[in-house]
Image (cartoon, rainbow, N blue to C red):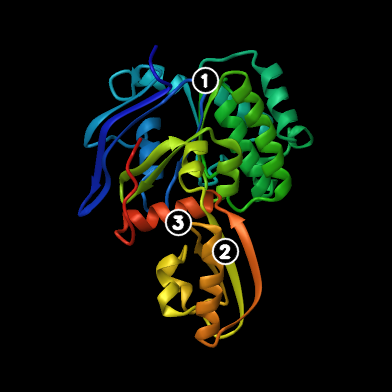
């Protein structure tokens, strides 16, 4: 049975910029998959290739076994993409927009599903409102509705909650989680790593067009499950000798609040003693477990060569 999305040595260059440098992995059917990375890592380029908006220079991408180039009609019918940008036609109402989108896929008499989508995304009261009159958050909801109107088995969400309110996030995630339970494959890119940690079963991390981590969320967190100590300085700053323990070493010596990795509980007192010896006054100490944001920072540091690289699994 083919994967929901399969990528084999996908490469893309824009002039001197290598946007994707041989990306290969598969996303299984029914997965809730996170695609993470800093700005410029290649996430949107990869999504554009999967969606048929950009053609790869080399390699192959397929959706449920259908090549996105040679069998593009089938691959696009099986895929729903929510883009980052707010793109809309200013001449139509919400309902008209969704009916037109249905028509692109040859779907008539689709009003029952359109009504359900609008209900789930809290758009019902806006059904007959022109798109120009909607707020940014409401336009974002319509983009999500457009991606779902043909009931695609594979759904790609490219930063769908960027710059939107808490209500939309909660509404969207409830609906998307329901679709995932019903068997839809979800691919999410987001800079809100708490969302990825809560929702995604498996994660790939990109840096400079390369995959630098690929495994289950639980496995990622387990591999970086060391505790960390968070220090708040009332006076002075972190001693230079402790910088190599910092989660974010590049800013550690100037920050009032610093997180340091702990290999064992016995590390706490030597750290505090080193701060006292340097004349620093610590007025608050917290011991925390690493979360996905900490894992992300450590992996990206490793990918830049600041720490040991993370091997793929």
Circle 1 — which element? loop
The residue at 42%/55% (across/down) is 298
Q: Disc 2 versus disc 1: distance between alpha carbons?
A: 43 Å
The residue at 57%/18% (across/down) is 183
The residue at 55%/22% (across/down) is 184
Please state which of the two labelled residues, at mark 2 or mark 3, is closer to the viewer. Answer: 2
Q: Quadrant of residue 2?
A: top left
Q: Disc 2 versus disc 3: distance between alpha carbons?
A: 16 Å
* The C terminus lies in quadrant: top left
- The numbered disc on residue 26 is none
Circle 3 sits on which residue?
Answer: 297
- The numbered disc on residue 153 is 1
Cβ–Cβ below 8 Å for labels 3 and 1? no
Between 3 and 244, the one lying in front of the other is: 244
Residue 96 visible in rendering: no
Circle 2 sits on which residue?
Answer: 229
Tell me if mark 3 has few (under 14), some (14-19) or many (20+) residues whose alpha carbon lies within 10 angstroms of its own.
some
Seen in the picture, residue 139 relative to 276 is either above or below; the reply is above
Tell me if mark 2 has few (under 14), some (14-19) or many (20+) residues whose alpha carbon lies within 10 angstroms of its own.
many
Circle 2 — which element? strand
Mark 2 or 3, nearer chain start: 2
Circle 3 — which element? helix
Where's residue 223, x and y in %?
45, 44
Between 182 and 16, the one lying in front of the other is: 182
Where's residue 142, x and y in %?
63, 37
Which residue is most to the right?
Answer: 125
């Amino acid at each position: 049975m083919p994967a929901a999305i399969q990528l084999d040595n996908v490469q893309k260059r824009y002039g001197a910029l290598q946007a994707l440098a041989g990306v290969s992995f598969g996303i299984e059917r029914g997965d809730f998959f996170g695609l993470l990375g800093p700005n410029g890592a290649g996430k949107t380029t990869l999504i554009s290739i999967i969606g048929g908006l950009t053609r790869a220079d080399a390699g192959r991408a397929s959706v449920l076994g259908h090549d996105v180039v040679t069998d593009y009609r089938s691959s696009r019918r099986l895929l729903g993409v929510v883009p980052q940008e707010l793109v809309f036609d200013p001449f139509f109402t919400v309902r008209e927009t969704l009916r037109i989108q249905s028509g692109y896929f040859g779907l008539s008499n689709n009003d029952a599903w359109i009504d359900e989508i609008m209900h789930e995304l809290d758009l019902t009261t806006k059904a007959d409102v022109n798109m120009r009159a909607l707020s940014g958050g409401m336009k974002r909801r319509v983009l999500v509705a457009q991606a779902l109107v043909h009931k695609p088995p594979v759904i790609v969400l490219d930063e769908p909650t960027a710059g939107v309110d808490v209500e939309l996030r909660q509404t969207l995630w409830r609906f998307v989680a329901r679709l995932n339970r019903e068997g839809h494959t979800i691919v999410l890119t987001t800079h809100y790593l708490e969302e990825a940690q809560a929702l995604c079963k498996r994660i790939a991390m990109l840096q400079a067009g390369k995959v630098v981590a690929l495994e289950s969320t639980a496995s990622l967190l387990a591999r970086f499950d060391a505790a960390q100590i968070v220090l708040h300085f009332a006076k002075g700053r972190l001693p230079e000798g402790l910088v190599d323990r910092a989660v974010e070493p590049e800013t550690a010596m100037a920050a009032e609040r610093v997180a340091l990795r702990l290999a064992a509980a016995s590390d706490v007192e030597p750290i505090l003693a080193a701060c006292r010896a340097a004349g620093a006054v610590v007025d608050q100490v917290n011991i925390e477990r690493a979360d996905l944001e900490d894992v992300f920072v450590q992996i990206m540091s490793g990918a830049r060569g600041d720490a040991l690289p993370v091997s793929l699994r």
